Image (cartoon, grey):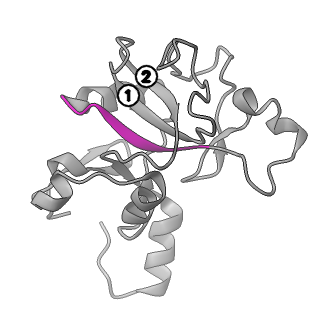
């Protein structure tokens, strides 16, 4: 909480790495898996953008940041062979931070997938082959601040969001630690 870059929205704290007091964190970028580990070490996870209000709030804080990782993930690993995940590019996306399934990519329920990308196709487009991680790109393709599927090895700044599961684990296992 004292390292800078922490803001509160609703009942959650968010860490914006590019606003950190630590120069290494402020200028840092991580691949998706290391980004998630960075957040989890802080009883947080990559941000899950589950409502329009949260999305609008987050967009106001991006400033000149070109892109960020989210906890959005394509279910493309063992255990993802359930019928309700098919077709994958429409029904196979979920928020890894809380395992909540995302709305279909072609539906009318809240989602903010871009209408374009590097291949000029609606997102998700799997342009690089396997693009199993979700990033928010800030007008990168002249499309506003939108969701894009991206290969997980790319490095980006991150937004961490506290999650009850991680906080409860820390409270139970480290009862003397002060958690906000």
Occupied quadrant, residue 73: top right
Give x and y (percent) for residue 120. Answer: 51, 11
Identify which residue is drawn at 61% across, 24% down.
125
Q: Secondary structure at mark 1?
A: strand
Q: Which residues are magenta?
A: 64-73
Q: Is residue 72 magenta?
A: yes
Q: Is residue 147 left or right of residue 145?
A: right
Instruction: Estimate how packed mark 2 is, as few (under 14), some (14 to 19) or many (20 or more) residues with alpha carbons within 10 Å.
Output: many
Name of the residue lying farthest toward the right? 83
Identify which residue is drawn at 38% across, 16% down.
141
The front one of 21 and 110 is 21
Marks 2 and 1 sit apart, C-alpha to C-alpha, by 6 Å
**For the residues bearing labels 2 and 1, Cβ distance under 8 angstroms:** yes
Q: Is residue 161 above or below residue 115?
A: below
Quadrant for the C terminus, please.
bottom left
Q: Is residue 14 left or right of residue 107?
A: left
Identify which residue is drawn at 45% across, 58% down.
36
Instruction: Estimate how packed mark 1 is, as few (under 14), some (14 to 19) or many (20 or more) residues with alpha carbons within 10 Å.
Output: many
Sooner in the amino-acid sequence: mark 2 or mark 1: 1
Give the label on residue 137, or none. Answer: 1
> Circle 2 sits on which residue?
146
Q: Is residue 37 above or below residue 111?
A: below
Give x and y (percent) for residue 37. Answer: 43, 65
């Amino acid at each position: 909480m004292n390292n800078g870059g922490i803001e509160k929205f609703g009942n959650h704290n968010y860490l914006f790495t590019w606003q950190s007091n630590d120069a290494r964190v402020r200028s840092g970028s991580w691949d998706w898996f290391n980004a998630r580990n960075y957040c989890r070490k802080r009883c947080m996870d990559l941000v899950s953008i589950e409502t329009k209000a949260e999305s609008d709030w987050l967009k106001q804080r991006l400033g000149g940041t070109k892109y960020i990782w989210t906890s959005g993930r394509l279910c493309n690993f063992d255990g993802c062979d359930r019928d309700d995940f098919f077709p994958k590019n429409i029904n196979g996306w979920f928020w890894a931070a809380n395992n909540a399934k995302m709305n279909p990519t072609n539906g009318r329920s809240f989602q903010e997938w871009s209408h374009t990308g590097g291949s000029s196709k609606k997102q998700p487009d799997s342009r690089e082959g396997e693009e199993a991680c979700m990033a928010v790109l800030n007008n990168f393709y002249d499309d506003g601040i939108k969701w894009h599927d991206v290969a997980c090895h790319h490095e980006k700044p991150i937004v961490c969001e506290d999650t009850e599961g991680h906080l409860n684990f820390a409270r139970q296992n480290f009862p003397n630690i002060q958690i906000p």
